[in-house]
Image (cartoon, grey):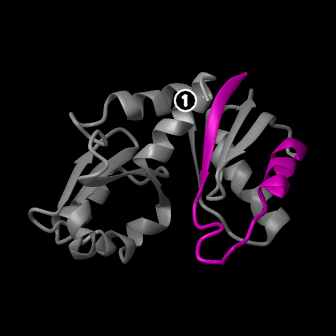
Amino acid sequence: MTRYVALLRGINVGGRNAVPMADLRATFEEAGYSDVSTYIQSGNVLFSSDRPRGELEPHLESVLEARFGIPMVVVVRSHRQLKSVVTKAPAGFGEDPDTYHSDAMFLRAPLTAAQVMAVIETGALREGVDRASPGSGVVYFSRLSAQRTRSKMSKILESPVYKQLTIRSWSTTTKLLRLLDGAG
């Protein structure tokens, strides 16, 4: 059995696509996953499975849409993959949350960091405010907190690539890793 985190895109945001966490956990368990738990209301599900990694995202999307009637994008990362996202972050990324608001953009294959960076480099960075770096299956994006309203991150949200990614704050990302590590 391998430990995973499923990152669901677009649920419980602004009162739309409401999915109770108890129902979400029950749906995962009914679909054959074990050790299921959730973290906060934004669709972070920790679970164990012996299914082949390549089957997880399409299976979960199908099961969740059938249960909740909402088409969902699900990005799954193994414990090892999430650990790599955290340990391979750019130097200093997320270390000064009072100065920078830092997010991890998790990409659903076949979307690549290079494709997202192409969008970012064509107008989604405001000099002196935004910074972005590609990773493996992730793009690291930070904004100067004092000037977050001047950020051009919305350019990514308006682009077609946005439909195949989900964003988590760096604090949520690192908390999910601690939960997978068993350190809570």
Q: Is residue 63 left or right of residue 140?
A: right
Q: Is residue 114 left or right of residue 180?
A: left
Q: In this picture, which residue range is highlighted in magenta?
A: 1-30
Question: In the image, what residue occupies the spot 66% across and 78% down?
Answer: 16
Q: Is residue 85 magenta?
A: no
- In the image, 95 versus 112, the foreground residue is 95
Residue 124 position (above or below residue 54): below
Looking at the rendered structure, the kind of residue marked 1 is: Arg
Residue 83 placement (x, y as % from top left): 46, 28
Residue 86 placement (x, y as % from top left): 39, 33
SS state under label 1: helix
Residue 56 placement (x, y as % from top left): 67, 42
Residue 161 position (above or below residue 81): below
Q: Which residue is mark 1?
A: 178
Q: How many marks?
A: 1
Question: In the image, what residue occupies the spot 84% across and 57% down?
Answer: 23
- In the image, 97 versus 78, the foreground residue is 97
Q: Quadrant of residue 47?
A: top right
Dot 1 crowding, Cα within 10 Å, few <14, some 14–19, many 20+ = some
